[in-house]
Image: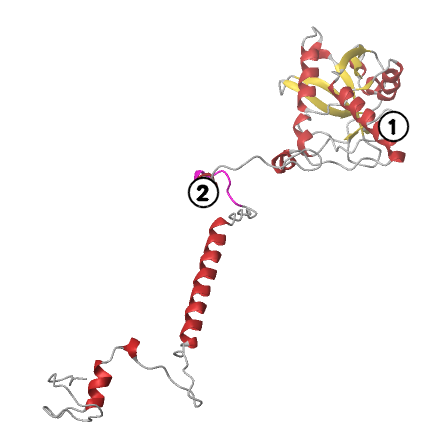
Amino acid sequence: MKCRKCGETLKEGAKFCTKCGTRVEDTQAAGAPESQLPPRQTDNGAPQPPKKNHKALAAVLVGIAVIAAGGAAAWKFQKKEPEKDIPEWGMDFDSEEAGQESGPQGPEEPDSYGQTDTERAERPAETAPAESGDAGEAAALSLETTAAAQEEEKPHRYEVVMMDCTWEEAFLDAQARGGYLVHFDTPEEYEQVKEILSSREDAEKLKLWVGGKRLPGEYEYHWVNTDGSFDASVLNSGPYEWAWMKDEPSFRDAGINVDECYMNIFYYKSENRWVWNDVPNDIIAAVSSYKGQVGYICEYE
């Protein structure tokens, strides 16, 4: 055995170098390699292998497990199919930006009826079927509505009937012919009838009954239906007022002291137009010079 410091050969059992004075134990501890250290001995003297560091090994294993788990989770997250965006109510699907963000989509899955979501959204709302007991009534109502619409579209026909008669006689005679005393329900209809009247050579002499009257003691004129009932329209107010002769209806002729409850139409030169007027039921009895000029307008549907 030699001194670590000066290399002097030392005697067996020496504790210090005789040359430099260095402790022999320090020399042995520093110079001996780890592999040559004697194994630890137990109390009974049997040699034991070096003790392993179990805590360090456990920490390494835990770290490896954590890394492995993190890698598996990351792989699973990457492989997971992205969730589809669910559109909200009111979203603008027509914008180009929305179309670019959504990207191409696969074909829609049809439902049990063979329709996709788009087809279901586009189809019109269904109406509840009629109860079996109501089916006949619904069909009848549909036919009546169709018939009424066709009846309204059918053009009416007008006839000038020259006849020295009272209003009441004209009312009954028109029904006997299959028509009724004319009602001017629209401005267009009124213009059509005026064209017919103006085309006659005796146009300026005509005194013709129309289908309007009032009840004695009342002051509203109405169109009279074939059953004698009154239409709701009030003919001497609102949109009809312009059709009357100036200062008419007067309701009574003070000159001959006769009530005027019936309507007629004639061409009034002073106003250069056809006008409505209220007169007595027997106009020829009131003005005899009208004989041969009286008649009525019959309307046919």
Furthest residue toward top: 201
Q: Position of residue 118 (x, y in %)?
A: 61, 36
Which residue is disc 1 drawn over?
A: 228
Quadrant in the picture for the N terminus: bottom left
Sort mark 2 into few (<14), some (14-19) or many (20+) by Cα contacts within 10 Å: few
Q: Position of residue 102 (x, y in %)?
A: 48, 41
Amino acid at circle 2: Glu
Q: Is residue 284 above or below residue 91?
A: above
Q: Earlier in the sequence, mark 2 or mark 1?
A: 2
Which residue is disc 2 drawn over?
A: 101
Q: Is residue 56 above or below residue 264?
A: below
Query: Marks 2/1: CA distance?
Result: 74 Å
Amino acid at circle 1: Gly
User: Start and end of the magenta stretch?
Assistant: 91-97
Q: Position of residue 114 (x, y in %)?
A: 68, 33
Q: Foreground mark, 2 or 1? A: 2
How would you classify the magenta stretch by its main secondary structure?
loop
